[in-house]
Image (cartoon, rainbow, N blue to C red):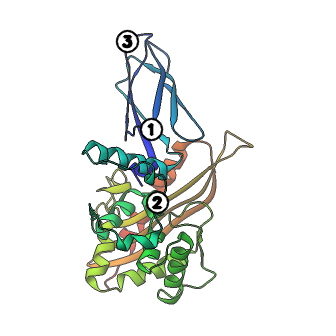
Amino acid sequence: MINDNIIDFIIKPGKADESAIIDYRPKVSSLKIYNKVITKTDGKNEIEFEVSSDGKVITVNGSITTATKEIIRNAPMVNPTDFARQALIDALQAEGIKINMDSAKKLPVFSSYNAMEPIVKYQSAGFAKYLRLILKVSHNTAADMLPLLIAAHQKQYSYDAGMKDIGDFLLNEVKLSPTSFSMLDASGANGNFVTSAAIIKLLSYMQNLPAEDFQVFFDALPILGVDGSLEHSGQELESKGKVHAKTGTELLNNLANPDSLVLTSKALAGYIEKEGKLLEFMVVVNNASITSLEQMRELVNDTVAVANTIYKYSLTKN
């Protein structure tokens, strides 16, 4: 995965009635970009992408006003595998390494790798840092890589195998009821279901792990009013800095009624620090009909307010 499998475009105004200035990243030699964005003195910014079926040609259409500093938008990598392959080839060639393009068209059989001599080794950051990235900013793409990493650790090589391992852990180690959760992926997107009781049981299980292991998980959670997805929430609340919790949002368009959106889930779950102890909690709103993103932000504030109320009135000492 490179750059979360998306291509970032940085668009700046040029001279009035002339083409805008476009840069993008990451760059690969096989990608062609056509700039059809016009700079205007008034109006509003409108940017649209036309992406070819193979993902190798992207046309950027629209307009940007002269008063705009820059616009950042992203387009999808249609074929992330081919994109990553070309990026690696470009990087090797830039270092003067010759590539046999005939043999590079197809990867060798997996079992033959052990007999090959590696020329470069890359070691990723530790898992604690990876987990922190996922939880602090709700990095769903990275979360969906976890089943593959878990499967590989068990010498299995499929997404389904990794999901089965996650299910076995929740059933056999955490002791969740088989009817308390259903998972289609690891990002928590639409189609995944879990009861509040199951979340509380999982949080309790994590808190009862060896202290060093739990601390890795605890430190990766967003902190109310401090960082991650909760950085800008609860700045004036008593519980600022005392709520360590993961946010979750699932919002769907309503094609039959474009003026209405369906908020299938807005959740906040984690721990509240109170008098030297940690309280597990979960607040969730399901299947709410809203008409604007502003209403969704109000729901975010409501869930944080409930967490603050728990902080204020939950006494752990007699």
| Quarter of the figure with the C terminus | bottom left
Task: Give how far apart the Cα atoms at labels 1 and 3 are.
Answer: 29 Å
Q: Earlier in the sequence, mark 2 or mark 1?
A: 1
Whether residue 281 is visible here, answered yes or no, is no
Give coordinates of residue 58: x percent, y percent: 51, 33
Give coordinates of residue 17: x percent, y percent: 45, 10
Q: Which mark is residue 114?
A: none
Q: Amino acid at mark 2?
A: Leu
Q: Amino acid at mark 1?
A: Ser
Say which residue label 2 marks: 107
| Quarter of the figure with the N terminus | bottom left
Q: Earlier in the sequence, mark 2 or mark 3?
A: 3
Residue 167, quarter of picture: bottom right
Whether residue 100 is visible here, answered yes or no, is yes
2, above or below 177, in the image: above
Q: Is residue 299 left or right of residue 245?
A: right
Q: Earlier in the sequence, mark 1 or mark 3?
A: 3
Give coordinates of residue 112: x percent, y percent: 42, 71
Q: Is residue 169 left or right of residue 52?
A: left
Say which residue label 1 marks: 30
156, above or below 2, in the image: below
Which of discs 1 and 3 lies nearer the camera? The answer is: 1
In the current view of this chain or complex, which residue is farthest to the right? Answer: 256
Label 1 Cα crowd, 10 Å radius (few <14 / some 14-19 / many 20+): few
> At numbered mark 3, what does the secondary structure look like: helix, strand or loop?
loop
Say which residue label 3 marks: 15
Q: Residue at x 68, y 39 (%)?
A: 258
Give coordinates of residue 126: x percent, y percent: 28, 68
